[in-house]
Amino acid sequence: MRRRIVIRLPRWMKRRLQRERRKTRDAALRTRIQVILLYEAGRGAHRIARSLGCVPATAVRVARRFQALGEDGTRDGHCDNGQMKVAEDLRQALAELVATSPQDHGWPRPTWTRELLAKTLRQHTGVNVSVTTVARMLSDLGARWGMARPIVLCPWSKARKARRLRAIFKIVHNLPAGEVAYFEDETDIHLNPRIGRDWMLRGQQKVVVTPALRH
């Protein structure tokens, strides 16, 4: 006779799982969390299966995995290559990638997509992760999908720019009598590629160096 599965959750863990269940867009993850919460409420596999529209074996498998792995056991229904997909070192690797540009890793585009992050993570860590898993890790990191800021690198040094500005101000402030100074705004012709949104960490705004031409 099999032993009844009993799950007891600390109050802080129960609140965290409830919060994640409400926020996640991953239906499979939501179901796994609900299984754990229903077990914690004292229900058995058959009652849980009827409530969630699954088979009792699924509820048992989720519960056993949670007992063995803790919260990480809710992250995915299977493991590839015997490694946990949402391990802390993998999240750290993702954070380091997000802080850089795809071009730093040999890709032609200047901004990240979740698909590109998944490919680059696989290259760097050997762990195969899905786009959904990458999205969840980005959420855990507090990353946002925001607009990168295009910049043009001036070929002049700061000292050279400062000297030129001092010379201009000197001319303006010492104009001969009867002469006036006119200011004309610059005219730009930008031949830049279109820059889309990019993933960036909290408090960070990505910048993209653009090959702008000025006439």
Image (cartoon, rainbow, N blue to C red):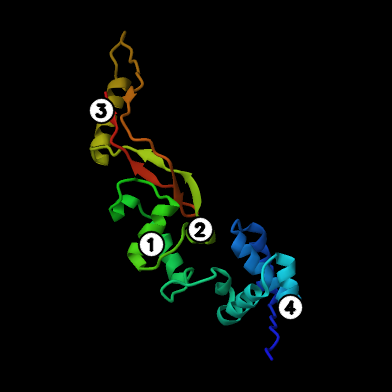
Query: Which corner quadrant of the image does residue 207 belong to?
Result: top left
Q: Is residue 104 visible?
A: yes
Q: Which is in the foreground here, disc 4 or disc 2?
A: 4
Identify the disc placed on residue 167. Answer: 3
Q: Nearer the N terminus, badge 3 or badge 4?
A: 4
Q: Which is in the foreground here, disc 1 or disc 2?
A: 2
Q: Quadrant of the C terminus?
A: top left
* Numbered disc 1: secondary structure: helix
Label 1, label 2: how far apart the Cα atoms are = 14 Å
| Direction from residue 87 to residue 181 in the image, left or right | left
Q: Nearer the N terminus, badge 4 or badge 1?
A: 4
* Amino acid of disc 4: Gly
Label 1: few (<14), some or many (≥20) within 10 Å?
A: many
**Residue indicated by mark 4:** 44
Identify the disc placed on residue 121. Answer: 1
Label 3, label 1: how far apart the Cα atoms are = 51 Å
In the image, is residue 116 above or below residue 72?
A: above
* Amino acid of disc 1: Leu
Label 2: few (<14), some or many (≥20) within 10 Å?
A: some
Q: Nearer the N terminus, badge 3 or badge 1?
A: 1
Label 4, label 1: how far apart the Cα atoms are = 39 Å
**Residue indicated by mark 2:** 132
* Numbered disc 3: secondary structure: helix
Q: Nearer the N terminus, badge 3 or badge 2?
A: 2
**Nearer-the-camera pick, 190 or 203:** 190
Residues tagged 3 and 1 counted as in contact (Cβ below 8 A): no
Q: Is residue 16 visible?
A: no
